[in-house]
Amino acid sequence: MKKRNISDSYVMTAYTKSAGDMLELETVRSTVKAINKMAAQKDKMNNYRYQSGWTDVEPVKSTRYRVKCQGRGPRTAAAIADGKHPRKYDQSLPLRHAERMDVYVYTV
């Protein structure tokens, strides 16, 4: 079996000039936000039940998620346009200069 060079956290590639891709990215972000909010409410309720003596099962913190967008595109021209050294954005490209972005969802 051949190993792919894609992370398990990878979700999609979104093009910044595509309204559909940006809408899909916003959907991913709002979904993760809702999941994290529900997890926080569940944790709060479980802690209350445990501290009130309603249960003797010690509460465990729920998993939280984080969305990360990694900018992709030409880096040298963007660095020069910002008045920086041409190799400045070799490690990470700011999203304002990105032609496309890879979207990842990580557990926190």
Image: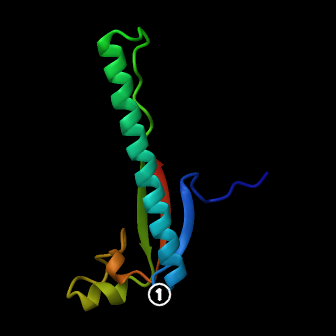
SS for dot 1: loop
Q: Is residue 64 visible?
A: no
- What's under tag 1, amino acid-wise? Lys
* Label total for image: 1
Quadrant of the rendering where the C terminus is positioned: top left
Question: 65 or 93, which is in the foreground?
Answer: 65
Name which residue lies at 48% across and 56% down: 31
Tell me which corner region of the image, top left, top right, bottom left or bottom right, holds residue 4. bottom right
Tell me the residue that label 1 is attached to. 17
Residue 69 in the image: above or below residue 99:
above
What coloring was used for the rendering? rainbow
Name which residue lies at 57% across and 55% down: 7
Name which residue lies at 62% across and 59% down: 5
Residue 106 in the image: above or below residue 15:
above
Name which residue lies at 42% across and 66% down: 69
Q: Is residue 27 visible?
A: yes
Question: 88 or 66, which is in the foreground?
Answer: 66
Q: Is residue 75 left or right of residue 7?
A: left
Q: Position of residue 92 (x, y in %)?
A: 36, 69
Question: 70 or 20, which is in the foreground?
Answer: 20
Q: Position of residue 45 (x, y in %)?
A: 36, 27
Tell me which corner region of the image, top left, top right, bottom left or bottom right, holds residue 42. top left
Most extreme residue toward the right, as rendered?
1
Residue 9 in the image: above or below residue 24:
above
Residue 71 in the image: above or below residue 105:
below
Q: Is residue 70 left or right of residue 24?
A: left
Tell me which corner region of the image, top left, top right, bottom left or bottom right, holds residue 38. top left
- Badge 1: how crowded within 10 Å, few (<14), some, or many (20+)? few
Q: Position of residue 86 (x, y in %)?
A: 30, 84
Q: Position of residue 13 (x, y in %)?
A: 55, 72
